[in-house]
Amino acid sequence: MVVGKPLSRIEGREKVTGAAVYAVEALVPGAAYGVIVQSTIAKGTVTDLDTSAVMAAPGVIAVLTPDNMPKVTEGFSGDSRAPLSDSSLVFAGQHLAVVVADTLEHAQYAASLVRVVAAEESPTVSMTDERVSDTLTVSDGEEVPEARRGDVASALNQPGLTIVSATYHTPVETHNPMEPSATVAAWDGDDKLTVWDSTQGVSRTRDALAKAFGLDPDNVRVFCPHVGGGFGCKGEQWHHKFLAAAAARLAGRPVRLALTRQQMFTSCGHRPETEQAMTLAAGDDGKLVAVRHASIVQSSSTNTHIERCGMGTSRVLYATPNLGVTHVLREVDLAPPTWMRAPGEAPGSFALESAMDELAIALKMDPVELRLINHADSFPEDGRPWSTKHLKECYRIGAERFRWSRREPNMRAPDGRAIGWGMATASYPAWRWSGTARIRLSLGEDGRLVAVSSAASQDLGTGTWTIGVQMTADLLGLTADQVTFEIGDSGLPRSGLSGGSATAAGLAHSLGAACNELKRLLLSHAEDTPVHGLRPNETVFTGGRLVAADDASRSVQVAELLARIPSRIAEGMNNPDAPLETGDVDYGGLRDKYAFSSFGAHFVEVLIGDPVPTVTVSRVVSVVDIGRVVNLKTARSQVAGGVVMGIGMALMEETRYDRRTGRPVNDNLADYAMCVNSDVPQIDVAFIDEPDYLFNPIGCRGVGEIGITGVAAAIANAVFHATGRRIRDLPITLDKLL
Ligand code: MOS
């Protein structure tokens, strides 16, 4: 078995030696440099875009403006307006032009010469500004979701309830992957486009560019061997991809276009601001009688994203007979928000899991106990069984490892600092987008079996290159060194987006299906062998043999079957026509019968400075149930990374805007505070590691996002335990504790 092993990343050496090539570094001869010119005005109308000085500047090759931008009507997403399509300004940072020059420095200088004249209006940057009104739809018409069970209002009138009502606020946060988004575009004639793009989905980006420029998808190739972090900001088809391609066509040569760190704050989304009004009511026994979770979330006029704070949290986490989950949107004059690691669940779990702590305190009950009492044994909405669920073990193991039973009021560290202990539940739904994969099996020169598996997937830095090898090896009964795994190229079999923590489970499913097709082919050449008559799923590969799953005495050498195939290569590929990104279609009715979700528990210790109340996270124990762990090392890194991001969310991350100009004021890594090593303690990550074979043949669920869910609440709860101060407004900066 290779699955489960803590294999080091197979591309790790390439990365630490700098040999790994990221999008902007693509080895494209003769590439020019594109620099985006952005609006510094948040609201108004462009009356003149004067580029006359630009063309005279040294090294300038072309200037892309709304006048020569090809009309793009499809393919783009994230921002509902087409790139360079409109002279009205709706946010600071809106793209106005692209200057292309022979060097980056020439392009940057020339871009500074673009003169923009605009009629300026005063922007609204705050959701609570009285000029902003509530809406229930985003710009493409999608409505905000809601969920109801029973009748919350009348339930709250029952006598003898303990009721907690409080409003929680989370600010705008910005994804800050190490690698800013970048696109290198090269045309071959007018109808063939090759792109190196930092993307969470090579297949989707390929389809988007093909649609936008009216090309045959087979004539568009997207390469993305490595991604330096995505976290959601590289999932949508943001404008810069189309601008790079249009600029390259205009310039008549390849163009490299990278967003600057500053541009990352306005050009590829952010986590929107939220305000969440929670009401929890429980009887003396701690059983929830009613939960209300009413969210107001930030939106913009060009926004297609809805932050679903209550859907993956209050709707599903606890058994309550009465539930009201609602959302409203408020449009402000800022760049459109988007998905950011556990969109909905990250801010939503801060509100719910803080409120659960407040309820536990009001009930004088241990917070773990309160959660056990309200454990949802089945999917609360419709009673469907969970495919697998081990949340109670997560609480138990987490509490043990943390030594939670020793929790007392007024604990002090040896240096006198107050100690606080807090906990929260983690949860994230399990997804796998439909996709395809191919497996080729043949005999190597040394007579050993070798396999090449491939899919147009991508590795965001999460370990996909490595887990693909492990899953393929296990499906074929091979060792890791017999397997090559290929991703990062849209020319490979179409595969799903790396979003929604769906990559590992999606690949497990499509590699499993490809393996089945491989078996079908081999079995069709097995007439006179002991496995004759068996169906693919009645066999397993073991030690170079194809073996009956329930009778080890029936088997055949795979090499013997390969020799009967004319090419001596056996190839299996699952349904190449499988639709992409449709979520439900690939489950074959399974989701009508079962609910699929991952769960976990975080236990956190904080130390509070005195007299200045700095908050230091000194200990974290996270226990998660993600089904079977494919790679202990990379899975651990995913959870720890989520916790690190959760510490940042709890204590420091906040994008601030100038109220007069609508521009972000801390759009750089010096002023936008995020966790650095000294902010992060040892993080003890443990897994339940029980397979979920209903989900895919490997038994794994995703692990990208669950790590951040609940962390901010666990920290806020620990801060309360230490200080008696309930901070409901993130981030918990020390001024709020003074
Ligand atoms: Mo991730 S926020 O689902 O791209």
Image: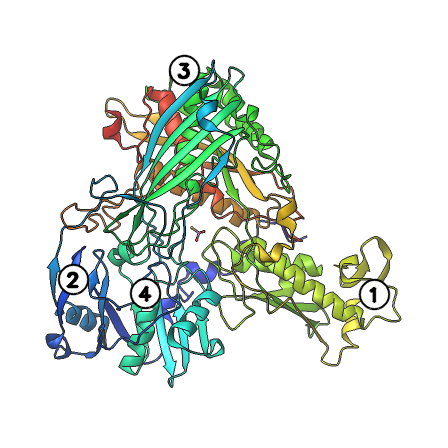
Residues at marks 3 and 4, CA–CA distance in whole angstroms: 53 Å
Secondary structure under badge 1? strand
Within 10 Å of disc 2 (Cα), the crowding (few <14, some 14-19, many 20+) is some
The disc, 3 or 2, on the residue closer to the chain's N-terminal end is 2
Secondary structure under badge 4? helix
The residue beneath circle 1 is 556
C-beta proximity under 8 Å, tags 1 and 4 = no
The disc, 1 or 2, on the residue closer to the chain's N-terminal end is 2
Residue at 40 percent of width and 26 percent of height: 717
Amino acid beneath label 4: His
Asked if the residue at label 2 sits under 8 Å from ligand 1, the reply is: no
Which numbered tag is attached to residue 481? none
Residue 713 position within the rendered picture, expressed as x and y whole percent measured from the top left = 40, 32
Amino acid beneath label 3: Pro
The disc, 3 or 4, on the residue closer to the chain's N-terminal end is 4
Residues at marks 1 and 4, CA–CA distance in whole angstroms: 54 Å
- Relative to 280, is 318 on the left or the right? right
Q: Does 687 sit above or below residue 340?
A: above
Residue 414 position within the rendered picture, expressed as x and y whole percent measured from the top left = 36, 20
Asked if the residue at label 4 sits under 8 Å from ligand 1, the reply is: no
